[in-house]
Structure formats: structure tokens, C-alpha cells
Image (tube, coloured by chain):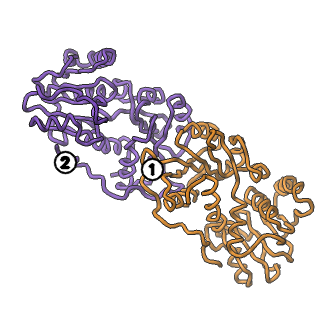
Chain colours: A purple, B orange
């Protein structure tokens, strides 16, 4: 397995909070698992930004109230979004990036100087940056993707945007598969297909399902039939070495762990929120 | 001038914030001057509480939206309140303490286990605790109070509650004076009066006006006529030694600086928010 990614996250955990500190929030339900506070507060501190990101547990049936309230907070500059609010938050953006509009999903919103809210989605871009940082450029790759949920959709769109040659999606839920094909097919005709199992003659196989979070989970797919040069990637961050990645390593396949997808979003957030550094 | 008060505020400025961190907010307009984040976050850290208090700039005309939103945040346990929202926030409490109800003003609200919001006011109690910590017990004291605004009202009520013998209030605004007399007179008949200047035969003279925040401010009252044993107190925290206190010291009078009022609220908040330690 590669070492942790090259993006440095130095500096203190968080600086002192004063009345002048700017606010950011990450919205989710639940929120205890959110890694954004640890990462973004390190980013703020490392760049000398007097800001803090706090976890906001917004129950699904009260999301609208929470967001209206946070938008009325004059020193709040941005929002990150995690499960299950990424779709609903599109309705709270005044404008969406191409990626967010294509996915129907936003994981980052910022207040513009004119007061409007602009939403983007960096899940897929973070994954692609993580691949590239590890020397794997998506252009021309043949990809198998397990999981057609929100993360899978974002990753599929980002890989196709960056020139992936062909993408085969597996998911036990035909509705999710069809939703993904309906959304991406028109943009990349003939390059996205569904299959019951990953094809063996591919360059990159990705797990974008939750399988692997729990030790007793079955593998999201069997890596044994994959050709020797295939890279096996996971988006699960805990544990860092999932059973899928361990099995792939045992088979002699190269692997790519989930943490890259998150840490490689940091430079994107820094730019999106117009932070210095 | 006495040394800073005895309440220890040790420990790190703030701990790392994770998805499990509980939230508190201080509401104000403006908010940049708020000292609550620095003090409360030290209190959390010193007591091993995984919580953070953040400054929330709630513009006066959007306070209701902000509070409705914050109440819908499931991991938010409490609110502190500063100028100008202490009166309006009474309307957002389901129940008020005796002190808050008497003052018509709340500076601290907590979420009860049943979800209701309970409001209290510790401004006056903090001042009285600060006096007592410096060896000045209010029982039996004759007091002159300059300033019949929110802070003056809270201090007056707390001093009378603790047995101050008589309280003379000065304020250039007759409406503020009358509002204070109307509110406190029925509770402590004959013990609260108004006057154009502090009487000279008193034990304690307090500035509860903003005069002294700006170097060019006139003194809130002239301490020269006060009897030699009079204690002169200020609620202004910046600068620590106001022109009033400097003048009083020059006259040989004992003084009591503003920081006590705030730091002595910390144990009250710890108890109110049911923090360990």
C-alpha cells in the first residue's frame, strides 16, 4: 500500500477562537464520523486563517431551518456537506458548478461577495487528484466502479471528465445503476455501461460502496480475476487497509487507499473558499 | 488595583474539534468584541469537555432566523448572548430564571433534557461574585450606580438581592432611570432612588456606563467628593485601568476593575451548562 499522501497538513490543530473568527460548518446526520473539522481546522491553522469549521448535526427533517439560520449568520462564510444532505443542499444554492449540477449533489457551498450561495462538489475531483498524486492519470483508463451511490456517481463523472476511456459500473440496486446511466450517459455516450461483475481486462477497479467499513462485510468485488497490472482503489478511510485492499495486495495488485480522496480535496477547498496560501 | 481574579483559567486554548464536539454559540451584533469564545473555550479545555463556543454574528433584523436555525442543530447545547440581543432572547426561552424574568434580559440559554430552552442572566451575579472574591460583600452597602442600561440594571438587581442597603442611580436619560425604578422599586421598596450625582456618603460607586472605553470619554462621575473609604468599581474591561479607576487611585480610593465581572461568570456558566469540574 502507498504511504499516506504527499499533501502536508502541518501546524497546530486549531488556533484560539475570538469574536473575530470566521465560521464554517459541516452539515450531516449523523455528524460524529465527520473528518472535515480535523482536516479543515488544520488547513486554516497552517495558512494563518482565523476561521473555524464546526460539526453541525442537522437532522434530515430540520435541514431547511438549520440552513436558513446559518445563512443569516453574518460571519459564516461557507458550508461543507456530508451524508445525507448533499442532494438536498443543491436546493439551497443560488448557483451550482457544472460538476454539482451534473451530479445533482453539492458538498461545498460558499457565500459570494454579493451574498449569493455557490455550490460545488469536490468528491470526484478529490479522488482524481489523489490518483494523479500517486502517479495514476485517468486519461485513457478502463475503469470498473463498484457502487452507483453518491460517491460512485461523483467519481465516475470526474474520471470521465478527465478522459477515462470506459467505465463499467456494478451495483446490486438496478435503480441506482439506471440513475447513474441516465445522468452520465448523455454526456459521455457509449463510455458508461453496467455489468454484474467488473470486467477482468481493466486498468483500475474502485470500491465506492460502504462494504469494508465493518470487518464482517463481504468484499465489494472479487479482485482475483483482475489482470496483473490492475490498480485496486478504495474510498473507505477506516480501516486504512480494507479487506479488499489487503486481498489485492496478496494477489500482487497495486492498491490506492481511501484517505487520498479526502486529503486531496483540501487544496480544492482552499481555492474554493479563497483562503490564502 | 487588585491583581486579576483568583479564578484559574489554565489549560490549552482549545482542543481539536471533531465530529463529536458539542457546540455553543455567543450571539451578538457586532460580535468581534466578544470575549466569551476565549474564556469559555479555555473553560472547556481545562475541564476536559469536548465542546467549542463560536462567535455568531446575528444581525438584529435576522436574529429570529438565526436562533430558529441554531435550535434545530442537534449537537448545540447552549447559547450566550451579548449586545443587543439580551432582551429579544427572552422571547426565545421557554422558561426564564427569576433573575432573567426580573430583568427582562437573558445572557445564557441552555437546552434542557426535554428539549425546552431555559434562560438565565449572570451579568449581575458575576459582578457580585467578583466583589465578594475581592473581599467586598454587598450586604448592608450603600451603593451609587452610574448607568441604568442593561448592565446597570443587572448589577443593581444582584446587589439588592444580596442585601445592599440602598442604591442611588444616575443616568443622563430619564427614561432609562424610570424604567429601572419601575422594574426594581416594587421588589425593593424605598431602597432604590435616582439622583443627578452619586451621594458622597456611600461605600461603593460603580460605573456601568460605556464611558471609559474611548480615551477621550469624560469620567462617568467625579470620584473626588467620595468619602475616603469608598470602593470605586468599573465594568469596563478595556482598558483594564480606566481613567475613572486611575483618578480614584490617585485620590487614595480602593478600586475594582471590570474583568472580575466576566471571569466570575465562568463558574456560573460551568454550573448552568452542567459541565464537569
Q: Nearer the viewer, residue B225 or A234?
A: A234
Whole-Å distance between the Cαs marked 1 and 2?
29 Å
Would you place residue A15 above or below residue B234 in this image? above
The C terminus of chain B: image quadrant: bottom right
Q: Residues within 10 Å of mark 1 (few under 14, many from 20)?
A: many
* Rendering coords of residue A212 (x, y %): 27, 34
Return the chain for callout 1: A
Q: Is residue A126 left or right of residue B233?
A: left
The N terminus of chain B: image quadrant: bottom right
Residue furthest front in the image: A216
Identify the residue position indicated by label 2 in the image.
A3
Which residue is depicted at the point 43% across and 33% down?
A118
Which residue is depicted at the point 83% across and 56% down?
B180
Q: Is residue A129 visible?
A: no
Q: In the rendering, which numbered label is found on residue A52? A: 1
* Rendering coords of residue B261 (x, y %): 67, 65
Residue furthest left in the image: A228
Which residue is depicted at the point 17% across and 33% down?
A232
* Rendering coords of residue B79 (x, y %): 61, 48
Return the chain for callout 2: A
Q: Nearer the viewer, residue A31 or A204?
A: A31
When asked about the image quadrant of residue B156, the answer is bottom right
Q: Nearer the viewer, residue A190 or A240?
A: A240
SS under mark 2: loop
Q: Is residue B156 visible?
A: yes
SS under mark 1: strand
Say whether disc 1 or disc 2 marks the residue closer to the N-terminus: 2
* Rendering coords of residue A130 (x, y %): 23, 40
Amino acid at each position: 500500500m502507498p504511504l499516506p499522501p504527499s499533501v502536508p497538513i502541518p501546524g497546530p490543530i486549531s488556533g484560539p477562537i475570538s469574536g473575530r473568527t470566521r465560521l464554517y460548518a459541516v452539515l450531516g446526520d449523523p455528524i460524529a464520523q465527520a473528518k472535515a473539522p480535523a482536516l479543515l481546522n488544520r488547513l486554516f491553522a497552517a495558512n494563518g486563517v482565523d476561521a473555524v469549521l464546526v460539526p453541525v448535526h442537522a437532522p434530515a427533517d430540520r435541514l431547511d431551518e438549520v440552513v436558513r439560520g446559518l445563512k443569516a449568520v453574518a460571519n459564516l462564510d461557507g458550508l461543507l456537506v456530508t451524508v445525507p444532505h448533499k442532494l438536498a443542499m443543491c436546493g439551497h444554492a443560488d448557483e451550482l458548478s457544472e460538476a454539482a449540477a451534473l451530479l445533482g449533489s453539492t458538498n461545498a457551498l460558499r457565500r459570494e461577495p454579493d451574498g449569493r450561495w455557490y455550490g460545488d462538489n469536490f468528491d470526484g475531483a478529490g479522488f482524481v487528484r489523489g490518483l494523479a498524486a500517486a502517479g495514476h492519470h485517468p486519461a485513457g483508463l478502463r475503469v470498473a466502479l463498484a457502487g452507483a451511490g453518491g460517491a460512485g456517481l461523483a467519481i465516475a463523472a470526474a474520471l470521465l471528465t478527465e478522459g477515462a476511456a470506459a467505465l463499467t459500473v456494478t451495483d446490486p440496486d438496478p435503480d441506482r445503476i439506471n440513475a447513474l446511466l441516465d445522468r452520465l450517459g448523455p454526456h459521455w455516450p457509449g463510455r458508461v455501461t453496467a455489468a454484474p461483475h467488473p470486467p477482468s481486462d481493466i486498468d483500475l477497479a474502485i470500491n465506492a460502496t460502504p462494504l469494508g467499513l465493518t470487518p464482517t462485510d463481504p468484499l465489494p468485488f472479487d479482485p482475483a480475476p483482475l489482470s496483473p497490472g490492475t490498480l485496486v482503489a478504495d474510498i473507505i478511510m477506516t480501516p486504512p487497509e480494507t479487506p479488499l485492499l489487503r486481498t489485492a495486495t496478496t494477489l500482487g495488485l497495486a492498491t490506492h487507499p481511501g484517505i487520498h480522496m479526502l486529503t486531496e480535496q483540501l487544496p480544492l477547498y482552499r481555492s474554493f473558499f479563497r483562503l490564502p496560501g
